[in-house]
Amino acid sequence: DTAVSQTPKYLVTQMGNDKSIKCEQNLGHDTMYWYKQDSKKFLKIMFSYNNKELIINETVPNRFSPKSPDKAHLNLHINSLELGDSAVYFCASSPSGTSGGSTDTQYFGPGTRLTVL
Amino acid sequence: KQEVTQIPAALSVPEGENLVLNCSFTDSAIYNLQWFRQDPGKGLTSLLLIQSSQREQTSGRLNASLDKSSGRSTLYIAASQPGDSATYLCAPTGGGNKLTFGTGTQLKVEL
């Protein structure tokens, strides 16, 4: 009965590899997000999707490609991994659409710690 | 572009103290402002959400205020406990439901 789940929890890989992180929410929310938390613990949005449509794309290298097969899932695929991609990646979801509600809380997953060697 | 600053960056207090965490933001065009808690190695837990039309929101020992025009919010924690030790993050919500996070305040409450 986990609300927002991510797999895997830990991911260790070599530079140049391609990897994917999966996210699923069972809250019936319309909007999902990916955030990156770097080594200095700074948390920044990468993407948001509303009903499978890309809404926010924040200056992220095109090696990162989000995929939303349905509104309950938002996966993150990363090509040609680099050392600087090492971080914790958080998925989140919220009830509302792009207009944002004044009461629209975002619910976060537990995070995926990616280490690129 | 929204920029969020939190002061202090770290705080260590004895159990039982009341304390105030500060957050300032540069763009007042926000839908709401949320305060989150992050425990080491864990995800974020939403503590309070203040709508842009509100001045204050309370949940148990936590009270958050918002002064949108001056770009400030404070989180007040009453009678702090060791279990309150965590990093507290402030995040105003802008267009597209975009959260912009502050740098966080790392709180340690000692016995």
Image: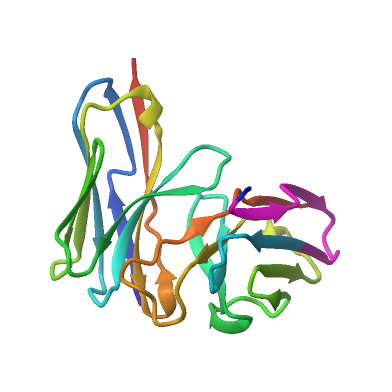
The quadrant where residue B61 appears: top left
- B5 or A89, which lies in front? A89
Q: Is residue A66 above or below residue B43?
A: below
In the image, farthest residue toward the top: B111
Q: Is residue B25 above or below residue B35?
A: below
Q: Is residue B13 toward the left or the right of residue B83 in the image? A: left
Q: Is residue B27 toward the left or the right of residue B104 in the image? A: left
Residue A67 in sight here: no
Residue B87 spot, x, y in % from top left: 41, 41
Q: Residue at x 50, y 50 (%)?
A: A41
Q: Residue at x 80, y 49 (%)?
A: A12
Q: Is residue A111 toward the left or the right of residue B18 in the image? A: right
Marker count (numbered):
0
Q: Is residue A99 magenta?
A: no
Segment colored magenta: A3-20
- A28 or A94, which lies in front? A28
Residue B82 in sight here: yes
Q: Is residue A5 magenta?
A: yes
Residue A18 spot, x, y in % from top left: 84, 67
Residue B37 spot, x, y in % from top left: 41, 44
Q: Is residue A27 above or below residue B78?
A: below
The quadrant where residue A21 appears: bottom right
Q: Is residue B3 toward the left or the right of residue A72 in the image? A: left
Q: Residue at x 71, y 47 (%)?
A: A9
Residue B80 spot, x, y in % from top left: 27, 27
The quadrant where residue A86 appears: bottom right
Q: Residue at x 34, y 44 (%)?
A: B9
Colour mapping used in the image: rainbow
- B100 or A49, which lies in front? A49
